[in-house]
């Protein structure tokens, strides 16, 4: 058996253990039953970007690729419309048009700053978590269950120096401060976990690709920039360049290609436009190793059978917490009333939806160099 957790569970545990205890999939797994989910603009845009960065089409002409990107966008919006129902989509055309204009502006802006060729898109990974005290052994729960960390990478790319980068696409209202990106726990954990998942591959750093929404409702979008360079290509790192075996193979076999260091190593680099910013952060070996140690330490606390569950109130967290009502009842000593609220106003969270397969993506069983190390069971 395997106990699997993701960044969302870890973040909830470290933010407020009471909310984590009520909502995490490994705990009570509850969610409000009457709250309608919002329109997932972030997911819609990332679906379209997954087609734009599809490895097999990276060397194709934009004239061929761009219509496919907008087709993917329309399909993603249609899926959201079907999920929410017609009553929730009175601004359907505005959402679609806003997303189209945002993507078109991005397609016009991106080519001059593209410095990686895509290798894999929307790729899932899982990594066995080591015991913090015995890194050569895996972490197990008291009942003998192996603890494993899982996640998803928006894009895995390789640059002209044969170095690999993990790329994250995010819609934002304002640029994320650089110091927060440097300490981005999810991205650092992904660097460590990917190197366990794909043995022999070293991650050079993370790329934070931010698309800024121009209005608070997310429906506006910039128009084309007439002063920008003409969009005549996809980027200046070719997909089929003969470097270490080629860059276009979905089941990547470039483990024997050693990366070449550039003449000047920049720790942080920004490529910034009016609506888009790409932040390159080169990660050190010490950073990645420390991220793995911290993940192991957090995992042991997360699965500790005698771990204390308590609230951690803060204005920012409590305002958006879905468990405010039962938590307030518990604060006032009304435990039975809190359980009644949970029974009548909350429901078990459904299983995570299966994501439709996509060429250029990968799952546990394919497209990897080797399985993660199989730690010894300390009980055996």
Image (cartoon, helix red, strand yellow):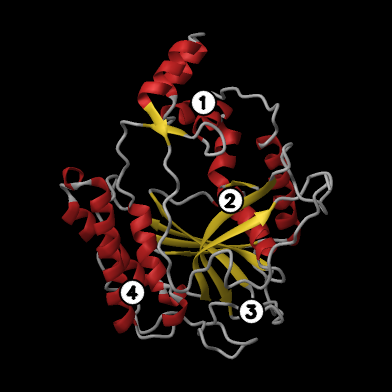
Judge depth for marks 4 and 2 and give the one in front. Answer: 2
Q: Earlier in the sequence, mark 3 or mark 1?
A: 3
User: Distance from label 4 to label 3 (Cα)?
Assistant: 29 Å
Residue 15: image x %, image y %?
A: 56, 33
Q: Classify 10 Å Cα crowding around label 1: few (below 14), some (14-19), many (20 and above).
A: few
Residue 211: image x %, image y %?
A: 39, 58
Q: Is residue 136 above or below residue 313?
A: below
Q: Write down the residue under mark 1.
A: 314
User: Distance from label 3 to label 1 (Cα)?
Assistant: 45 Å
* Residue 138 falls left or right of residue 335: right
Element type at marker 2? helix
Q: Earlier in the sequence, mark 1 or mark 4?
A: 4
Q: Classify 10 Å Cα crowding around label 4: few (below 14), some (14-19), many (20 and above).
A: few
Q: Earlier in the sequence, mark 4 or mark 2?
A: 2
Identify the residue at the far bottom of this view: 242
Q: Residue 186 — which label?
A: 2
Residue 161: image x %, image y %?
A: 64, 79
Q: Is residue 245 above or below residue 31?
A: below
Q: Write down the residue under mark 3.
A: 162
Picture quadrant where residue 301 is located: top right
Q: Write down the residue under mark 4.
A: 228
User: Distance from label 3 to label 2 (Cα)?
Assistant: 24 Å
């Amino acid at each position: 058996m395997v106990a699997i957790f993701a960044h969302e569970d870890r973040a909830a545990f470290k933010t407020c253990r009471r909310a984590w205890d009520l909502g995490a999939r490994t705990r009570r797994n509850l969610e409000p039953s009457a709250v309608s989910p919002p329109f997932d603009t972030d997911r819609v845009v990332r679906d379209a970007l997954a087609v734009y960065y599809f490895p097999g089409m990276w060397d194709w002409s934009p004239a061929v690729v761009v219509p496919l990107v907008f087709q993917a966008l329309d399909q993603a919006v249609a899926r959201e419309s079907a999920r929410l129902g017609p009553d929730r989509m009175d601004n359907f055309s505005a959402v679609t048009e806003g997303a189209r204009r945002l993507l078109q502006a991005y397609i016009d802006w991106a080519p001059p700053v593209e410095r990686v060729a895509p290798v894999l898109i929307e790729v899932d990974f899982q990594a066995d978590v080591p015991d913090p005290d015995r890194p050569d052994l895996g972490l197990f729960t008291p009942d003998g269950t192996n603890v494993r960390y899982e996640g998803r990478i928006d894009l895995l790319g390789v640059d002209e120096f044969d170095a690999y980068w993990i790329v994250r696409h995010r819609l934002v209202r304002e640029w994320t401060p650089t110091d927060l990106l440097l300490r981005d726990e999810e991205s650092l954990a992904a660097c460590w976990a990917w190197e366990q998942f794909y043995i022999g591959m070293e991650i050079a750093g993370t790329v934070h690709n931010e698309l800024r929404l121009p209005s608070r409702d997310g429906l506006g979008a910039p128009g084309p920039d007439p002063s920008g360079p003409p969009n005549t290509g996809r980027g200046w790192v070719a997909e089929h360049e003969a470097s270490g075996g080629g860059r276009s193979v979905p089941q990547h076999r470039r483990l024997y290609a050693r990366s070449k260091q550039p003449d000047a190593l920049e720790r942080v680099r920004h490529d910034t436009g009016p609506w888009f910013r790409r932040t390159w952060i080169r990660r050190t070996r010490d950073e990645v190793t420390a991220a793995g140690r911290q993940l192991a330490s957090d995992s042991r606390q997360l699965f500790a059978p005698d771990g204390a569950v308590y609230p951690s109130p803060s204005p920012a967290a409590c305002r958006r917490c879905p468990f405010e009502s039962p938590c307030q009842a518990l604060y006032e000593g009304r435990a039975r009333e809190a359980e009644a609220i949970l029974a009548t106003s909350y429901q078990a969270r459904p299983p995570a939806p299966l994501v439709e397969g996509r060429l250029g993506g990968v799952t546990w069983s394919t497209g990897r160099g080797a399985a993660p190390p199989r730690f010894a069971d300390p009980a055996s």
